[in-house]
Structure formats: C-alpha cells, structure tokens
Image (cartoon, rainbow, N blue to C red):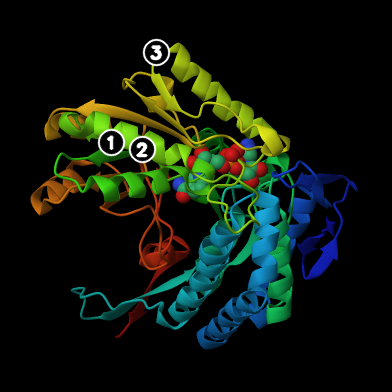
Amino acid sequence: MEAGQNLIGGGWRASDSGATFVTVDPTNGETIGVVPDGGATDIDAAVTAARDALGDPQWARMSPSERARLLWRVADLLERDAEEIAVLETRDQGQPLRIARNVSVAGAVEHFRYYAGWCTKIDGRAPAHSRADALNYTRRVPVGVCGLITPWNFPLLIAAWKLAPALACGNTVVLKPAEQTPLTALRLARIFIEAGFPPGVVNVVTGGPEAGRALVEHDGVDKVSFTGSTEVGRSIVRGSAGNLKRLSLELGGKAASVIVGDADLERAVAGNLQSGIQNSGQVCAASSRFYVARPRYEEFAERLAKAAAAVQLGPGQDPDTQMGPVVGEEHLSRVDGYVRSGVEQGAALLTGGARAAGPLARGSFYLPTVFADADDGMRIAREEIFGPVLTVMPFDDLDEVAARVNDSEYGLAASVWTRDLATAHHLADRIHAGCVRVNMVAGIDPAAPWGGMKASGWGREMGTEAIEDYTEVKSVWIGLE
Ligand code: NAD
C-alpha cells in the first residue's frame, strides 16, 4: 500500500491535523493508498513556501536555459519510471494500462518537453509607438504563486499540462490533486525533488474540497488554474474575488458529434465509439450526443450499439481490456441515475444500461450504453454524464443540426464526420466550441490550445496560449532625453 505525505517547502509532511484519507482501486474496491487530508493550515504553509520561493534567488534568478534543463529532467525521470507510474495511475484511476502508458505518462512527458523548449522563447516586444523621447519595451513576467486544482479523470496528465507551462514561465505552484486519485501527483512530487527544483517551487497538498477552497480564497495566491466541474468552477469565480486572482477554468462539456449523410460509416462508428467510451467516458471532451443524418440514423445507431456491446470490460492491467471501471461507486450511481432518467423520459435503450455482472460486479464497472430515439430536451442529451452513455438522435439539415449542437450551456468540443470539405468547414465555423474535430477521435497535443467557450470555461491551456495565461505583460518606458 502507498503511504503518501505532502510536499511543502521541499520537505515531506503529514497534514497539520494528522487526518488522512484512503484511495481505492476501482476494479475491486481495495484500499491502495493513504494520504494526508490537507486543510486550510496545510494550504497556508504551502502557499507561504511558494511565495518565499518566488523571491529566492535560486529560482528568481535562474536563467531560462537552466529552467528548461530542470523541466527536461522531469520528463527524463518520468520516462525512466514510466511503467511504474503508469501502473500506479491505472490502479488509482482505473484506466486501461494502455491509456496510462500512451496517453497519461507519455502525454505528461511531452508536456514537460514542449514547455522546456518554451523557457528560452518567452519574449517581449518593442511596440512601434510615436514618442521620439522614449523607448518602450514589454516583458512577460511570471504571474506569481499559482494554485493548480485537478480532477480525477486524467490525474497525472492534467497536473502536467498545468505544471509545465506554469514553471516554464517562472511561477511557483501549489498543486491540489483530486481526492479520488492523489497517488501520481505525490509520485510526481518525488520526481521534482530528484530533478533538482529548489525547495518551495513545487508544493503538493492532497485533500478534498476544503483544501481546494482554501487555495482559491488565499490572498497569497495570484492565479488559480482549475480543471473540474462547471458547478465548482462557478464557486471558484466567487471564492477568488478577494484579491481578484487570475483564473483559468477548464470545466464540463457535452460534446456533440455530427455524422453527415456522406460520412464513412465504418470509420464513424469506430471513431465515435472510441471518442464516447475512452477512459469509460470520463473525458471532458468525450462525444456523448450524436446527431446522425436521418437516412443513416438507424444503421448508425444499430452499428454503434453492436460495437458497444462487444467492448471488452476488465481491470486496467489486463492487456485485453478495452474499457475499465468508472472511478468509484459514488460516480457509478450518478451514471446509473442518468441512465434511469433516459429510460423514464422515453429514450430507447439499445444496449447496456446496468453495471457489469459476474466477476466484474465487485468493481465499479458500467456497461457501455447506447440510447436512440431521444430528444434534445432529455437529461441524457443535455447534461454531462461523464460515463459511457451515448445518445443518438436524427437530424434533417445542416442549419438545424448546427443550431441543435449550439443549444447547450457548454461549448468545449464537437466532432464532424463527413467526406465533404465544404460541409466540414461550414460546420466547424458554425459550432460554438473551443475545439472542433473533423473525422477524428478526441485527443490533445501540447502545441495546440485546449479549452472551452460558454460554461465550459475561461482561458486556454497548452500551446502559446498557456504561456500567455501564466504570465503578465509589463510595459517598460525609458526616457531618452
Ligand atoms: P470536481 O469539480 O468535483 O473536482 C475537481 C477538483 O476540485 C478536485 O480536486 C476537488 O477536490 C476540487 N474541489 C471541489 N470543490 C471545490 C471547491 N469548492 N473549491 C475548490 N476546489 C474544489 O470535478 P471532478 O468530478 O473531479 O471532475 C470531473 C469534471 O471535470 C467534469 O465536469 C469534467 O468535464 C471536468 N473536466 C474538464 C476538463 C477540461 O479540460 N475542460 C478536463 C477534465 C475534466
């Protein structure tokens, strides 16, 4: 069993209160780790350490190329321990080991390398102003202490996509991972120490909502970058008002997928199933409502249901597993509640609709579920389920479907499946979402911006956009007379 401690100011510490909580393997409900249940005083200590480190010459005067070397070293160490860390992620989160290796750990490595490259390229500019008596130049400077709050669906990867740009820009950080999946964040903390980061630059405090709230409300924090639910995102906007800290919010989604009449149906079925059930549907960008051109609707729904019924469920560490459990029992009940609402509201359940029976009944396994004959007003078509529940509906023309896709409080991601370039551009233009995919499965890359419109959030992670989000612009005037 893993026994973790918080990393604060370069030292390992239990929580101030001595409280702990356990984390379980969702494939069988067994306890696999015990970690500190951090509260306001632990967060305060971590924020103080991060503030001290901001001014510490070891960090403040570190050259960009030295910072780059440290970040690159984190990537190397992650790669060295990749298999061990992937297994840890699978045990804590439930994701198939293939995903833990190829998406979570490999993706984290890529983020550290990508932003290591950025350290030496964060330039200002010399604006073409009209004053002959002065020189003006701008610099991008660190925002300061960044509070990073992460969810449980991709614990390591999401921590990496916040830590890497925050540190590349010269900030210091306090990371608060989700209480369901704290283990890889603490493992990553060990890597930061081994890589040689100065004490207090990276702090990790495990805990639940109380620790998150303390970080959001702390006046010593200059920016919060949060990934999680829209509901908590709203409370963070309110909680951060005290010192008007900067906010990046990556929130919920209800991604639509439009399957146009000319789409390659075989590819569309396989791609949409993968986009819908990868990581058991616990992906903010997972496609979950499918609008299919009426002439292909029945065929698509039947083929999707058949493919969903054939998905191999099992423990993440079994190489034959295509889909693991959902993160835990509480979440399974929530997913099942949505499925019951779909049945009650009159949608046709084509496959799934229950937890897995037999040997998998011990774990939190939910069968891939496909509904047809739904309408846009049903909860399964409107609300984020964050589970393997796919809802298929017909459409008649492109204007109609664009309006229906946009009739959502969310605007995170959407997909279009068509062989016609004009249709693809037309829909990509009309859809209000931070990301539109054409003929491809959901995925990310550190170089491309990621984030949502409307209630899916504020700001963008990854790419140049994250560099802008983790810096402030300073304008310097020099008198020339
Ligand atoms: P959540 O909002 O319940 O929790 C996320 C984190 O916030 C956890 O660390 C939690 O402890 C903390 N927290 C809870 N209450 C808090 C409060 N009042 N103040 C501060 N922190 C608080 O979300 P979750 O259930 O862990 O994750 C699922 C959600 O995350 C889904 O809505 C999903 O769409 C979203 N998500 C979004 C993205 C994206 O990039 N847009 C990516 C992954 C997940």
Label 2 or label 3, whichever lies nearer to me, is: 2
Q: Secondary structure at mark 2?
A: helix
Q: Is residue 135 above or below residue 315?
A: below
Left of 241 or right of it: where is 211? right
Q: Secondary structure at mark 3?
A: loop
Q: Are marks 3 and 1 in contact (CB under 8 Å)?
A: no
Q: Are marks 1 and 2 in contact (CB under 8 Å)?
A: yes
Q: Is residue 278 above or below residue 238?
A: below
Residue located 39% across and 19% down the image: 348
Residue 408 visible in the current orientation: no
The crowding category of the residue bearing disc 3, from other C-alpha atoms within 10 Å (few below 14, some 14 to 19, many at least 20), is some
**Residue 443 bears which disc, if any?**
none
Residue 154 visible in the current orientation: yes
Residue located 51% across and 23% down the image: 338
**Residue on which the image places disc 2:** 304
Residue 123 on image: x %, y %: 38, 78
Left of 295 or right of it: where is 6? right
N-terminal-most mark, 3 or 1:
1
Residue 339 on image: x %, y %: 50, 23
Q: Does the numbered disc 1 mark a residue whose Cβ is under 8 Å from ligand 1?
A: no
Ligand 1: quadrant of the figure: top right
On-image quarter of the N terminus: bottom right
Q: CA distance from mark 1 to mark 2?
A: 6 Å
**Residue on which the image places disc 3:** 346
The crowding category of the residue bearing disc 2, from other C-alpha atoms within 10 Å (few below 14, some 14 to 19, many at least 20), is many
On-image quarter of the C terminus: bottom left
**Residue on which the image places disc 1:** 300
Q: CA distance from mark 3 to mark 1?
A: 20 Å
Kind of residue at badge 1:
Phe
Kind of residue at badge 3:
Gly
| Quadrant in the picture for residue 66 | bottom right
